[in-house]
Image (cartoon, rainbow, N blue to C red):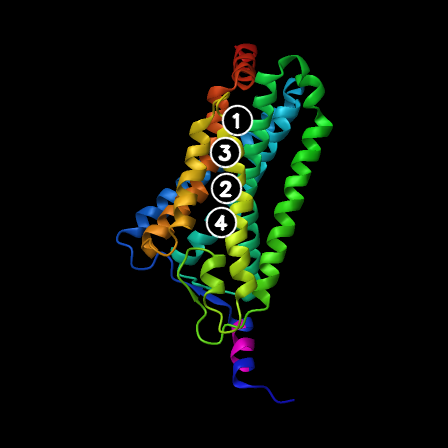
Amino acid sequence: ISSSPSDLLFNQQLYFGHYMIGFIGIPNINYYYVFLFFVYVVSVLGNMTVMAIIYLDYNLRTPKYVTVFNLAFVDLVGSSALVPKVIDIFLFNHPSIPYSDCLAFMFFCYTCLLMQSFNLVALSYDRLVAIIFPLHYQVKVTHRFMFSLIASFWVIVIIAHLITVGYITRLSFCESVVINSYFCDHGQMYRLACNDNTPSLVMAKLLPILALWLPLAFILLSYFYIAHLSLVTIYFIPILVTFTMNANIHPNARIINLSLTSVFPPMLNPIIYVLQTQEIKMWFIDMFWYKM
């Protein structure tokens, strides 16, 4: 069976995978890896603590904390999928990644990143109903409703990214397999293709509207009545600037900006909810008071 030169190159790409060069050339970048590791450790400890508190305290098994638990889970999985691999690639000089691993890397990173967005929508809806319809809150926001809402968000995000990754598998990388990013970035990958990448281009335009602009519009409308604006600012502003100014932003600035957006919210979410949530503060007080 004969193969064309492009097919041979594509098969080589499938075997050898892609190469990451995202952080290469940035001055004093090793200090940034140490910083990422510190953020990751704080994120893991914080989110595991929040999940353990909600699981152990029956008083916190309310519809609101279904969303808080899910947010902590998403942050934990997202950070664990991203940071250790980034440190392995760049700090320990393993820039190559097999093609199948690269697709899995892309799927988990984007799924967790955008699931954070939908989690913020669920939290905003919970607070909005509690403030506007306090007498009907127990009826409108039930465990069944919140589980259904979170499950629906998971289904939407997973299907969207399965389609996105599926379109990537139809691309041929016959000229370059070098990705100028710190992970298997969808935008960087489909632009390397030497065949028609229109479906991937459409998904790149559609997903930010579905998973960023629409959730942000709902959250901003709800924030006429509720707080937690700091959490939304930390998550949405950097990522929207990155994707909106994609062609005009310096590659190194884009990489640093997007990487900070990926690791900061998972670290800060547990701190925000511990400091601002009365129920969790009372749990700590009861625990320490009981031991004393």
What residue appears at the point 45 percent right and 31 percent down from the top-left corner? 231
Residue identified by numbered label 3: 45
Rendered location of residue 93, percent (x, y): 39, 61
Rendered location of residue 265, percent (x, y): 46, 36
Q: Where 115 falls versus 253 (above or below)? A: above
Q: Is residue 105 visible?
A: no
| Front position among marks 4 and 1 | 1
Q: Which amino acid type corresponds to the residue marked 3 in the rendered image?
A: Leu
Residue identified by numbered label 4: 82
Q: Which amino acid type corresponds to the residue marked 2 in the rendered image?
A: Trp
Distance (Cα) linking label 3 and label 2: 31 Å
Q: Residue furthest bottom?
A: 2
Precedes in sequence: disc 2 or disc 4: 4
What residue appears at the point 44 percent right and 72 percent down from the top-left corner? 176
The span shown in magenta is 8-13
Q: Secondary structure at mark 3?
A: helix
Numbered-mark total? 4
Q: Secondary structure at mark 1?
A: helix
Precedes in sequence: disc 3 or disc 2: 3
**Residue 11 belongs to the span the image colors magenta:** yes
Residue identified by numbered label 1: 222
Mark 4, Cα crowd under 10 Å, few <14 / some 14-19 / many 20+, is many
Residue identified by numbered label 2: 213
What residue appears at the point 48 percent right and 37 percent down from the top-left corner? 266
Precedes in sequence: disc 3 or disc 1: 3
60, 255: nearer the viewer: 255
Q: Is residue 162 visible?
A: yes
Q: Are marks 4 and 1 in contact (CB under 8 Å)?
A: no
Q: Secondary structure at mark 4?
A: helix
- Magenta region, main secondary structure: helix
